[in-house]
Amino acid sequence: MSFNEEEVFQLFKETEALLEGHFLLTSGRHSNVYFQCAKVLQYPKYNELLSAIIASYFKSFEIDTVIAPAIGGIVVGQEVARQLNKKFIFAEREDKALLLRRGFSLKEGEKVLICEDVVTTGGSVFEVIDIVKSNNAIVQGVGFIVDRSNGKVDFRFPQTSAMKIDAISFPADECELCKKGIPLIKPGSKKIL
């Protein structure tokens, strides 16, 4: 079974992964909606189906390794790698910078697919792109579950998502929700406060 974009959106609603309120995003921006991918991806069958959208798109690409930024991208990256039968590694934060740790490495010329759960500004993905390039490996593409930018973020490599949505977000100092006095919630995994 495969999902179309509307079915993906409904899946987020059914699993209570689409939250509405006033949220602090990983990017530092504020939004009235938040996609808690972990709520959907906690179900292996949904992770398999959503990750299959990414794996299917990249199945004809030459890929040696799948890499993801911790934490959100790990579940997606692992499943995409499993479906493509490729090695999987992840980058994690240390002193606010994403790094390869735990003995993970990339070789010169290694062909890499980057996976993520949600993209708003693409900050974490751009950091992983820099890691791949700094190791003289080759970015083959970027796959993610939710594109909150509705296609406005361009990584300059082939990219695909399971769902695109033009979610409203504000710079923190211009937030309409703050002006209305709506309490701010920080539901993600990255500590940015």
Image (tube, grey):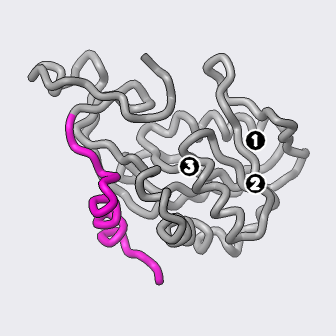
From the image, tell me which residue sits under label 2: 88
Residue 172 position, x and y percent, is: 29, 20
Q: Is there CB contact under 8 Å for labels 3 and 1? A: no
In terms of depth relative to the viewer, which is nearer, 118 or 190? 190
Q: Across the whole image, how many numbered discs are drawn on residues?
A: 3
User: In the rendered image, is residue 107 in sight?
Assistant: yes
Q: Secondary structure at mark 2?
A: strand
At label 1, the amino acid type is Val
Q: Is there CB contact under 8 Å for labels 3 and 2? A: no
For the point 75% across and 48% down, the residue is: 89
For marks 2 and 1, the one nearer the N-term is 2
In the current view of this chain or complex, which residue is farthest to the front? 43
For the point 58% across and 47% down, the residue is: 73
User: In the rendered image, is residue 53 in sight?
Assistant: no
Answer few, some or many: residues within 10 Å of disc 1's Cα (few below 14, many 20 plus, some between 14 and 19). many
Return the mark for residue 108: none
> Measured along the vertical axis of the image, is residue 11 above or below residue 102?
below
Residue 97 position, x and y percent, is: 65, 23
In terms of depth relative to the viewer, which is nearer, 158 or 146? 146
Q: Residue 165: name its quadrant.
A: bottom left
> Measured along the vertical axis of the image, is residue 49 above or below residue 128?
below
Return the mark for residue 116: 3
Q: CA distance from mark 3 to mark 2?
A: 13 Å
Q: Secondary structure at mark 3?
A: strand
Residue 78 position, x and y percent, is: 67, 57
For marks 3 and 2, the one nearer the N-term is 2
Using residue 24 as the reference point, say whether residue 178 is left or right of it: left
First to last magenta residue range: 1-21
Q: CA distance from mark 2 to mark 1?
A: 13 Å
Using residue 52 as the reference point, say whether residue 151 is left or right of it: left
Return the mark for residue 132: 1
Q: Is residue 17 magenta?
A: yes
